[in-house]
């Protein structure tokens, strides 16, 4: 008589494999959270930078003013690009006809700035406030990102200090 061998794992082998897997997940999870928060901050910074570049080029192309207006809850809650003076973010969401770009809220990112709005004139220069600066943070201990706009209207991204 032949004895049949059954292929597979024993319960002990399965428990050891699950234990090793649990340890590896426990080690990797904090680093992965930090990675995700850092990517959100980079993404939000680039969205703001690209919006500034886009608004500048639209102002030059249209030969008129282009406005970037924040959401009523602040810049981190989103913003809209509009060609109509005085149009708000909420009005752009309700009627996007004169709002070529609308940005939703930036999840997990705070934005500190003194700029109430940003206005580009027909030459692509800032006409609302001199040199607006946006400080973006993704959480405590992370490196801050700073988006500045020069007098000529050109935005730039720089690394700042540590976020509070």
Image (cartoon, rainbow, N blue to C red):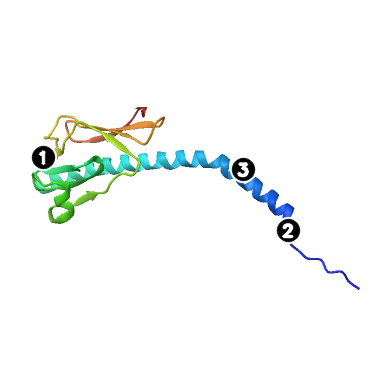
The picture places residue 62, in percent across and down from the top left corner, at 11, 48
Between tags 3 and 1, which lies in front? 3
* Residue occupied by mark 1: 121
Local packing at callout 1 (Cα closer than 10 Å; few below 14, some 14-19, many 20+) is many
* Residue occupied by mark 2: 9
- Return the mark for residue 102: none
Image position of 154 (left or right of 61)? right
Sequence-earlier tag: 3 or 1: 3
Residue sitting at x 17%, y 31%: 151
Assign a secondary structure to mark 2. Answer: loop
Residue sitting at x 41%, y 40%: 37
Q: Rounded to the nearest whole Å, what is the CA distance between mark 3 and mark 1?
A: 57 Å
The picture places residue 140, in percent across and down from the top left corner, at 39, 31
Local packing at callout 3 (Cα closer than 10 Å; few below 14, some 14-19, many 20+) is few
Assign a secondary structure to mark 3. Answer: helix
Q: How many marks?
A: 3
Between tags 2 and 1, which lies in front? 2
The picture places residue 65, in percent across and down from the top left corner, at 10, 43
Asked whether 69 or 140 is in front, the reply is 140
Write down the quadrant of residue 149 in the picture: top left
* Residue occupied by mark 3: 23
- Quadrant into which the N terminus falls: bottom right
- Does the CB distance between marks 3 and 1 fall below 8 Å? no
Image position of 139 (left or right of 91)? right
Write down the quadrant of residue 76 in the picture: top left
- Quadrant into which the C terminus falls: top left
Sequence-earlier tag: 2 or 1: 2
Asked whether 16 or 66 is in front, the reply is 16
Looking at this view, name the residue that lies furthest to the right. Answer: 1
């Amino acid at each position: 008589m032949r004895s049949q061998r059954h292929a597979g794992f024993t319960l002990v082998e399965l428990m050891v494999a699950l234990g090793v897997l649990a340890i590896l997940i426990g080690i990797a999870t904090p680093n992965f959270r930090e990675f995700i928060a850092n990517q959100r901050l980079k993404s939000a910074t680039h969205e703001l930078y690209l919006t500034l570049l886009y608004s500048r080029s639209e102002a030059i192309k249209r030969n008129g003013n282009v406005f970037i207006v924040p959401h009523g809850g602040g810049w981190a809650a989103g913003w809209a690009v509009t060609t109509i003076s005085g149009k708000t973010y909420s009005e752009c969401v309700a009627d996007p006809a004169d709002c070529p770009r609308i940005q939703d809220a930036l999840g997990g990112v705070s934005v500190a700035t003194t700029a109430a709005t940003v206005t580009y004139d027909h030459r692509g220069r800032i006409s609302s406030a001199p040199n607006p600066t946006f400080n973006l943070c993704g959480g405590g201990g992370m490196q801050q990102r700073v988006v500045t706009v020069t007098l000529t209207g050109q935005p730039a991204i720089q690394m700042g200090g540590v976020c509070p």
